[in-house]
Amino acid sequence: MTAPRPLRARTDAGRPPAEKTPDPLGMTGREILQGTLDGRFPGAPILSALGFRLAQVGDGTVVFEGEPGDQLLDPAGGVYGGFVATVLEAALGSAVLTQLAGGTRSTSVKIGIDIHRAVRSDTRTLRCEGTAIHVGTTTASAEARLVGAEDGELYAHATSMYAILRML
């Protein structure tokens, strides 16, 4: 019996590490995401592992872009549906985050996802656009669409509900 291989850590090799990440608790969600986009803060490790990156940040809107690859294949050779769900949830939560004040964060309480077209390892660049629909003092909602960046074809869409949490 051979010893199991040690797990390898994945890092965002595309950007240099931020020199010092300030405490984000007092920052607005938009400031956090803009700092990530500008390279001042590290991106979410899950997105770099999936081959996606934050591309745009606006008031109540975000865009992620990336290319699926062989690392996402299931045993049958298709891309796991969890990949689509994760990218959509990143856009949903980030769109809400852009509207949150310092000391306030959110957590998902309900996510609905509809997949319209299969994502394959050779699928070209995908674009995931998230939009906050409502952000109140206790709840928020958002929607997101995963589309082909070049042809605009819809791969999946999602809606979500969030609980708003006061952290300070």
Image: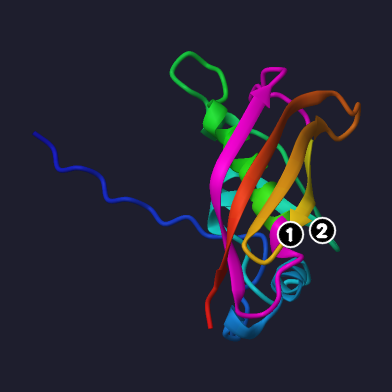
Residue drawn at x 59%, y 61% is 106
The amino acid beneath tag 2 is Gly
Residue 89's spot in the image, x, y percent?
A: 62, 45
Labels 2 and 1: the sequence-earlier one: 2
Residue drawn at x 81%, y 31% is 147
Q: Residue tagged by mark 1?
A: 135
Q: Secondary structure at mark 1?
A: strand
Q: Is residue 106 magenta?
A: yes
The amino acid beneath tag 1 is Val
Colour scheme in use = rainbow
Q: Secondary structure at mark 2?
A: loop
Read off the magenta span: 96-124
* Dot 1 crowding, Cα within 10 Å, few <14, some 14–19, many 20+: many
**162 relative to 67 in the view: left or right:** left
Tags 2 and 1 touching, CB below 8 Å: yes
Viewer-side residue, 24 vs 77: 24
Residue 101's spot in the image, x, y percent?
A: 71, 76
The quadrant where residue 139 appears: bottom right
Image quadrant holding the N terminus, namely top left
Q: Residue tagged by mark 2?
A: 60
